[in-house]
Amino acid sequence: MNFFMLGGCEIHDTIKWLKQGCPQHNFIEQGMSTLGSIYSPQGKIAEHTYNWYTKNNLKSNPIARAVYKEIVSKPWLKDVKENVYDKKDNWIIISFALEGEARYEDGQEHVTLIKELVNKPNNKKFEKIVQLKYPTYCIDKLNDHNFTMGWENEFVGKRYLRTKGGGWLDKLGQDIHDHFEDRVILIYTPPARKWFNRKFGVYHQLPKHGDWISWNTGYWKNRTKDYWEEHSWERTNRNYQGLYKGFQRYYPKKIHWIKMEWENLVGDEHHRFGKSPFHYDNKSIKKIGNAIQGKINEIEAAKSS
């Protein structure tokens, strides 16, 4: 079977384990962005980005490609649909972990603030974008904290769960239903609450949600004690679970569900992409891989019975 996998680093890291543990299946990493970025209309930021990318012939530059994919081409779901050739053997595995990223939203455009776009000290990826002469218009817009918001913002939340069609979860369901029908697996990997330091063999508690999310874009700075109590890890977990339950509610077919418990997941303090509650250590990745493999075995057993 072919498994198209949509998600962030938690999916990227798990695929390596799955390819070794389930060599009889084909696991295809598609990457992903936030649903808001995928389903929102394009405007002047996209126009400036397109002109910069094409006029300077930046296709071979990985930093420029990442920005172009995020703002202009948004290829993730398009690639899945183009590569699905036999419905019976194709499945899709979806993680919504990336939905926790901060975004730029001005009422016209909605952009996920990936590292390449965030003007923050010692951000080498942003420095490279500046060296590539990324338009000042885009940099100034995307780093205007008046238009930066978190996914828990009420405005964003309503976009996910909007009824009568048009909501981001509903649109995702419509996009994948024609290609996968009931061959959908949702995997919920909650944010880890502690890191493991491999060098010293000790654990550290992770900071609160706003201290890590999207590189402190400025939206979470100088928040009050009441704000942090409102946006505790428990609240963050509930928000994530709400996305998964919302998608199940909107999707027209019964789908498969894998729920990892946060007590079993630990962040890796030395992860190659830096610290994040979704940059798990090797033991946690193995647990996620085992859970996916167990679900696949369950599906195969049901097919043969």
Image (cartoon, rainbow, N blue to C red):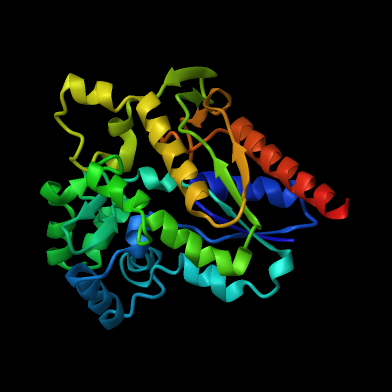
Tell me residue 237's x, y (percent). 42, 31
Q: Residue at x 15, y 51 (%)?
A: 147
In the displayed structure, would residue 165 be above or below residue 194? Answer: below
Answer with the quarter of the image where residue 214 lies. top left
Q: Along the line of sight, which residue is nearer the eye, 10 or 2?
A: 2
Q: Along the line of sight, which residue is nearer the eye, 155 or 277?
A: 155
Tell me residue 160's x, y (percent). 35, 51
Tell me residue 198's x, y (percent). 54, 26
Answer with the quarter of the image where residue 101 lies. top left
Tell me residue 66's x, y (percent). 38, 63
Q: Residue at x 57, y 69 (%)?
A: 178
Q: Residue furthest front?
A: 164
Q: Residue furthest bottom?
A: 55
In the displayed structure, would residue 45 be above or below residue 305? Answer: below
Q: Along the line of sight, which residue is nearer the eye, 38 or 65?
A: 38
Taking 32 as reference, is 15 left or right? right
Quadrant (top left/top right/bottom left/bottom right) for the N terminus: bottom right
Q: Is residue 273 visible?
A: no
In the displayed structure, would residue 288 be above or below residue 254? Answer: above
Q: Residue at x 39, y 24 (%)?
A: 234
